[in-house]
Image (cartoon, helix red, strand yellow):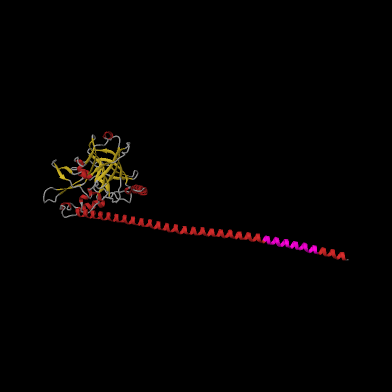
Amino acid sequence: MKYKVFFLSIFISTAIHANMMKDMALMVGAQVGATQANKDITNEFSNTFNDIQQEQTNLNNDTNYFFTSTSEAQKNLMSNISSIFQTARKQVSIIQDKQSKEAESTQSYIQSVTSLQVPAQNYLDNPILYDQLFANGTMYTPQTRAWKNIFQIGDWEFDEETSSFWQYEAIPFTSTTDQHQDAFKNFIFTEWNTHKSYEIFCDITLYKVSYPFYVGIIFNKARWISGDTYGLEKYRTLGIYARNNKKVSLCFAQSVMQSSKKKNSSKEQFITPLEQISQNQGVQNFTINQMAFQNLSTKPITFHIKIKPTPNSVAYKIWDHGSAEPSEYTNINTGTIISNTISNKKNKSKKYPAANYNDLFLYHGVGFLSPGAIAQFNLKGPQELLFSQNNIDNFKNEISNYFKDQQYKFTSRQLESSTTKGV
């Protein structure tokens, strides 16, 4: 009994000790695990905090960069806008000054042509008739730009198929008792004004001529002002003049008004460009391919002409079809034209002091001259003077509808006439 109690005590004691060891192991394991978990959590928290701090730093840097960049961009933009505005103001000021000067020049021009110092006969030559001629001289062309055929010399027409102007009659220089009268007025033109530099580009084709003849381009054509009867013939011209098929010239001339050298005299003589050219004046340059004119009766000749006008000079190129375009322009200094010798009715030469129109560059009308020649003028520039393809198409339809209408009326009259005869 005693031993039973002893062994039971030992068994119980061993069991209790084993449980205690187990509990201790669990406690130690839990403590170690908690310590490691706490360490891991602390590390993770520290890393997360560091990441947050870094992100905050990056965010602050990005924000500062954004505001700095935005401020710099706004500053640059405002600077550019201010610069553009200042430049625009300067340009507006320049344009206003230029317009003011042009207005003053135009006013001076109008005053000069309506001055009481101009001989009264200039205004007694039936100015109302000239107003009527100008008003009724509009050619039948596509819309948007009016072309004028004031004096109705020959047969000027617009050809819608080639978009070009034609003179279908070779009206000679001496077609009236007043020599050259028709020749000087055998032209058409359109009024135009611009503040930009420009180049005139035109193809001229000759089909038939009667010597002498002149075909050329009118430019810097003055606008029509009622009462200024000379205004219709104030222009510059560059073109081809031939006395015969062996003497062909490239000529330039501009309108001039010559004052009498006599004291106390207000008499002035207006000299047209063609009058100067026909008297071997103006600028003449014998550089035209004269051999091409030998076969003109069987083969038309086409010349390409480019002109760049300025107030005191004219630059040009001219070359015949099939040849290469010249690489450089030829310049004419219009200020060097200092005198003109014009023959009077008694065939006596008289020299006048030069008084070239300084106001010729105020206006930029363009036109064509063709006395003594059947010629075609195909204008290719400036672009502002060309008819649009839409306007040409409408013009073609208008002509087609007109002929259809005329054909219908003719057929109706024929049927009506046949019916009447049958009754």
Q: Is residue 346 left or right of residue 204?
A: left
Residue name at image x 75 percent, y 61 percent:
22
When asked about the image quadrant of residue 307, the answer is top left
The answer to if 14 sits in the magenta stretch is: yes
Q: How many marks?
A: 0
Q: Is residue 25 left or right of residue 301?
A: right
Most foreground residue, 414 or 93: 93
Residue name at image x 50 percent, y 59 percent:
60
In the displayed structure, would residue 418 be above or below residue 49? above
The answer to if 241 sits in the magenta stretch is: no
The percent position of residue 178, horizontal first and vertical second, equals: 17, 44
Range of magenta residues: 13-33
Residue most extreme to the left = 263
The percent position of residue 184, horizontal first and vertical second, equals: 22, 44
When asked about the image quadrant of residue 169, the answer is top left
Q: Is residue 288 left or right of residue 34?
A: left
Residue most extreme to the right = 1
The percent position of residue 223, horizontal first and vertical second, equals: 25, 51
In the displayed structure, would residue 88 be above or below residue 378? below
Residue name at image x 85 percent, y 64 percent:
6
Most foreground residue, 347 or 403: 347
Q: Is residue 293 left or right of residue 264?
A: right
Q: Is residue 419 visible?
A: no
Quarter of the image that includes the N terminus: bottom right
In the displayed structure, would residue 294 be above or below residue 203? above
Q: Main secondary structure of the magenta part?
A: helix
Q: Is residue 28 visible?
A: yes
The percent position of residue 108, horizontal first and vertical second, equals: 21, 54
